[in-house]
Image (cartoon, coloured by chain):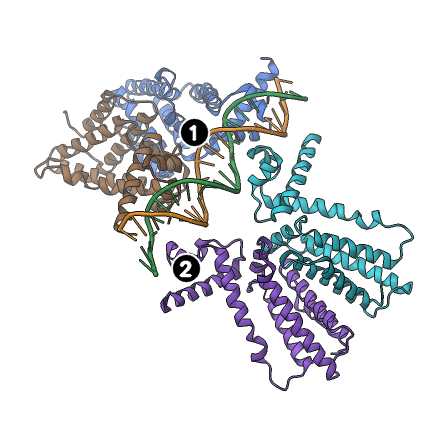
Chain colours: A blue, B brown, C purple, D cyan, E green, F orange
Amino acid sequence: MGEKSLQKKKYILETARKVFMQKGFKNVTMKDIVEACDISRGGLYLYFSSTEEIFLEVLHMESEQSDDVFSDSIGDDATAADILAFFLNEQKKELLRKRDTLTIATYEYYFESNVPKKENILKIQFDSAVKIIEKLIQAGVMSGEFSCEDCLGTARNIMYVLEGLKISAQTRGVTAEMVDRELMFILKELGIKE
Amino acid sequence: MGEKSLQKKKYILETARKVFMQKGFKNVTMKDIVEACDISRGGLYLYFSSTEEIFLEVLHMESEQSDDVFSDSIGDDATAADILAFFLNEQKKELLRKRDTLTIATYEYYFESNVPKKENILKIQFDSAVKIIEKLIQAGVMSGEFSCEDCLGTARNIMYVLEGLKISAQTRGVTAEMVDRELMFILKELGIKE
Amino acid sequence: MGEKSLQKKKYILETARKVFMQKGFKNVTMKDIVEACDISRGGLYLYFSSTEEIFLEVLHMESEQSDDVFSDSIGDDATAADILAFFLNEQKKELLRKRDTLTIATYEYYFESNVPKKENILKIQFDSAVKIIEKLIQAGVMSGEFSCEDCLGTARNIMYVLEGLKISAQTRGVTAEMVDRELMFILKELGIKE
Amino acid sequence: MGEKSLQKKKYILETARKVFMQKGFKNVTMKDIVEACDISRGGLYLYFSSTEEIFLEVLHMESEQSDDVFSDSIGDDATAADILAFFLNEQKKELLRKRDTLTIATYEYYFESNVPKKENILKIQFDSAVKIIEKLIQAGVMSGEFSCEDCLGTARNIMYVLEGLKISAQTRGVTAEMVDRELMFILKELGIKE
DNA sequence: CATGAATGAGAGTTCATTCAT
DNA sequence: GATGAATGAACTCTCATTCAT
């Protein structure tokens, strides 16, 4: 596959990504993507042979890019509390964006698929987020910012609450206040009185 | 609509329920339900005119029946901790049943619809569950079983964790151990050393 | 068939008539009539077995009633010109009523059917109207009101113009002015300067 | 849409035209056209999305082609009477063809639709025919072939009679003699003794 | 007589997928 | 590589008609 082909493939993925954000996973047809990309029906099949295949690649693209978030945006002298606050705030923004997210598409996709666990991106991301948060909490405990008995448990708890907020946002609707309230509750448990 | 019609309607709803449990919401067609019920194409339309309509009635059926769960199965002399443990255990069983649940169908349905908040069953159930848990915790605090500063906040936190576990169970998969671990964490926060 | 049955049959026909006026012939289903009559599906089949059968009976009802129009509403001392004017005015009113008429249903019905000529009500009505107009014109000629060389030809011509106006009204739309203009033209030919 | 597509579209329209001639408008389903064209169900939808759409294009095709009738078939030295006779004869042939005509389909279509007047082809054709006939009559009056007081009125009258004959032909049936008789009557009014 | 539940045929429509160009 | 016409399967939905009650 030449350079030009790679370009086109990337173009398709980026366009498809927008489509998935708008319509979720199950509602998206090959036709939708063909039309959004303004290419020919047959053309799309040269690169991908199903929406599932496309979606998986979109997801990979996504996870590669999101790896950098932490490192990019945080200054060197940030405290653990700062970083955690930053992370939670990012999550909050994501939560409240509602339709402009791959969340629904991702859930819908994983509802269907019997993806082997090892390759389940959701799982990988969840687990790695837990680890990061755990490290963060430990650092905070070291520096006296936080107090907690079971850092790993707390990290996991935080992630489940976030997951709960995420699905709530997409199904029942949540307001900024509701998110804040839950995040506060979490932080309080860590001994922060912010 | 006569008695017999009501019987049949109920039969359809119960059969459709199973279909939704197996296939979620979006994958279910009127044809699927027709075949599961072993009735004619037109016959189904006498009772319902879309999968959405059917699903909503299934959901209502469901929520009416689940109202009784608490009252039915708990002895009069149960302590707050007993009741909470029972409730969490029910949730755990539900969580682990995975495919045998309306969870996915429900999420899929609410992903799509812009149901007015007031009528959103998910919201109603969540909110009422929060209240019940709050009462339970208060009772436990009174009786010295639990200790907590912010009972309402804790109740909400519990529900969000459960919600997070629920979606995790359907997308990443969770084991009994993973659920237990989270429930333990919650109970520990309440001052229980179980 | 008892008295009561006859009543019911008549009720159905009168109700169906309204339905045909609103929807034409081809658009009317047995279901439409059942619903308009508020009777049971099976009930309708006790009396009629197709929309065609119903429509034909409606048409007969109609033609029996319309026979009286002339005799009923015209005074004894009316001149030929008066009567002709009255007749044309009735036609004009009918024409302009547009949707409140069996015209479309009738046309639609006869487009389809291969009715033996003898039983074709349209033909019978047309022919008898021609005869009446011819008589009228002859009477007018006798009394010096009209002048014409070919009374039968003129009568026929009048009827074809009316027919032309009728179909125009239903397809292209005609205004009162357009109808008047054509009727004037006809009357002028008869030597009337009205 | 390429050249080949245009060819196919034209082929579909021509085939559909025959179907409409045989079955009218309302009786024609997409399936009928698919079968007549011997193409696939989905194939038809690539070009048209409803029988209405197809019919309208058939009608346009028709009206474009019929524009030429006059100019094509008449010699330069024809008198007004010749041309009028030719025109009426064409109409007569059309009338008597009965089933081999778009007449019924057209009427059925315009019974239904609330086409804005400006775009109503029936109206456009009627009005333009009136104008042509008027011109013809005026020319005939100039050359001494015809005599008439109200040329426009006469032209209109002729068209309404033709319209009346047309609908009569489709509903009651008319014979060649009946048409001739009416045309004679019209010509006599113009002072022709043919 | 009357009801209305039930059936099944048939029309409309949309797409995934293929394939000749 | 790229196109887009073509196919056919799968769904949705509506009714005429029947029949047990």
Q: Residue C108 has which mark? A: none
Visible in this render: residue A168? no
Q: What amino acid does circle 1 point to?
A: Ala
Q: Residue C47 has which mark? A: 2
Q: What amino acid does circle 2 point to?
A: Tyr
Give residue C141's quadrant in the image. Answer: bottom right
Q: Residue at x 62, y 36 (%)?
A: D37
Q: Position of residue D84 (x, y in %)?
A: 82, 58
Give residue D50's quadrant in the image. Answer: top right
Q: Is residue A96 above or below residue D137?
A: above
Secondary element type, mark 2: helix
Relative to residue A151, is residue B78 drawn left or right?
left
Secondary element type, mark 1: helix
Q: Are marks 2 and 1 in contact (CB under 8 Å)?
A: no
Dot 1: chain letter: A
Relative to residue E18, is residue C92 drawn left or right?
right
Q: Residue at x 62, y 44 (%)?
A: D53
Tell which tag, 2 or 1, sits nearer the viewer.
2
Residue at mark 1:
A105
- The residue lying toward the viewer, choosing from D7 and D144, is D144
